[in-house]
Image (spheres, rainbow, N blue to C red):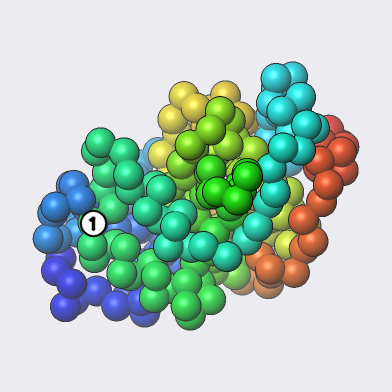
């Protein structure tokens, strides 16, 4: 599908139907729709913080921000050798962000963006798109704060699209397409707010995660 056929409204309707867009590469002029038979999700009460990640979080050598450099997070996610983020994807999600439907959670250190994650919000569903890390564990730290924010903001579904070994090690699981649609339909009828929760300190983040996992 080319740029002329894709609008933010089409994209939101696709997410509500359980599908999402990808491109073959950054140079691909087209995008295609994906509807996996098996879907990755993060149960929001089951995020796993390892001992090493816990120590790194508690050092607090970073600051957490939301939606201060959405384009920077997109660029960070696209800077790997192979990426599905082409110009169409970049422009579309930038438009969604301006409309309030795409969010970024960012890890900053020494004045530089060192990691982050971005995704789409609809009702009580967060559709995680991609993440990146320029320093050790920066993307894991971003996910830890993201899961806490989603819990505090009233979300019930964190869709990771696919289950990777990295996400599995942090507590993500895989479910069937049918199971996913049950959770999606429930989440779409809920009200949640990504921007309402305050960012907790590291100690509180770890404490709340221990209480729920």
x, y percentage for residue 107? 61, 47
Q: Residue at 44% of width from left, 67% of height from top?
A: 16
Q: Is residue 157 left or right of residue 8?
A: right
List the single residue furthest toward the front. Answer: 110
Count of marks placed on residues: 1
x, y percentage for residue 136? 56, 28
Q: Quadrant of the C terminus?
A: top right
Front position in the image: 129 or 124: 129
Front position in the image: 45 or 23: 23
Is label 1 in a helix, a strand or a loop? loop
Quarter of the image holding residue 91?
bottom left
Q: Is residue 149 left or right of residue 13?
A: right
Quarter of the image holding residue 6?
bottom left
Q: Residue at 59% of width from left, 55% of height from top?
A: 105
User: To which residue does mark 1 refer?
Assistant: 86
Front position in the image: 38 or 70: 70
> Eyeballing the image, is 139 above or below 111?
above
> Eyeballing the image, is 174 above or below 95?
above
Q: Residue at 54% of width from left, 69% of height from top?
A: 122
Q: Residue at 34% of width from left, 57% of height from top?
A: 20
x, y percentage for residue 184? 53, 58
> Eyeballing the image, is 122 above or below 112?
below
Q: Is residue 172 visible?
A: no
Q: Is residue 118 left or right of residue 61?
A: left
Q: Quadrant of the N terminus?
A: bottom left
Q: Decide: few, some or many residues near mark 1? Use Cα within 10 Å; few <14, some 14-19, many ≥20.
A: some
């Amino acid at each position: 599908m080319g740029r002329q056929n894709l609008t933010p409204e089409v994209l939101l309707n696709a997410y509500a139907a359980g599908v999402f867009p990808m491109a073959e590469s950054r140079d691909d002029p087209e995008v295609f729709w994906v509807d996996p038979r098996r879907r990755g999700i993060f149960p929001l009460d089951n995020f796993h913080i390892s001992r090493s990640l816990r120590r790194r979080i508690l050092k607090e050598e970073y600051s957490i921000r939301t939606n201060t450099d959405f384009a920077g997070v997109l660029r960070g996610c696209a800077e790997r050798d192979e990426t599905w983020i082409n110009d169409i994807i970049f422009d579309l999600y930038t438009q969604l962000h301006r409309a309030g439907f795409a969010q970024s959670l960012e890890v900053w250190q020494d004045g530089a963006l060192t990691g982050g994650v971005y995704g789409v919000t609809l009702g009580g569903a967060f559709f995680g798109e991609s993440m990146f890390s320029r320093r050790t564990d920066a993307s894991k730290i971003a996910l830890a704060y993201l899961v806490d924010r989603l819990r505090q903001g009233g979300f019930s579904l964190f869709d990771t699209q696919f289950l990777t070994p990295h996400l599995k090690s942090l507590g993500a699981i895989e479910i069937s397409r049918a199971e996913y649609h049950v959770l999606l339909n429930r989440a779409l009828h809920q009200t949640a707010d990504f921007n309402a929760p305050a960012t907790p300190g590291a100690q509180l983040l770890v404490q709340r995660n221990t209480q729920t996992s």
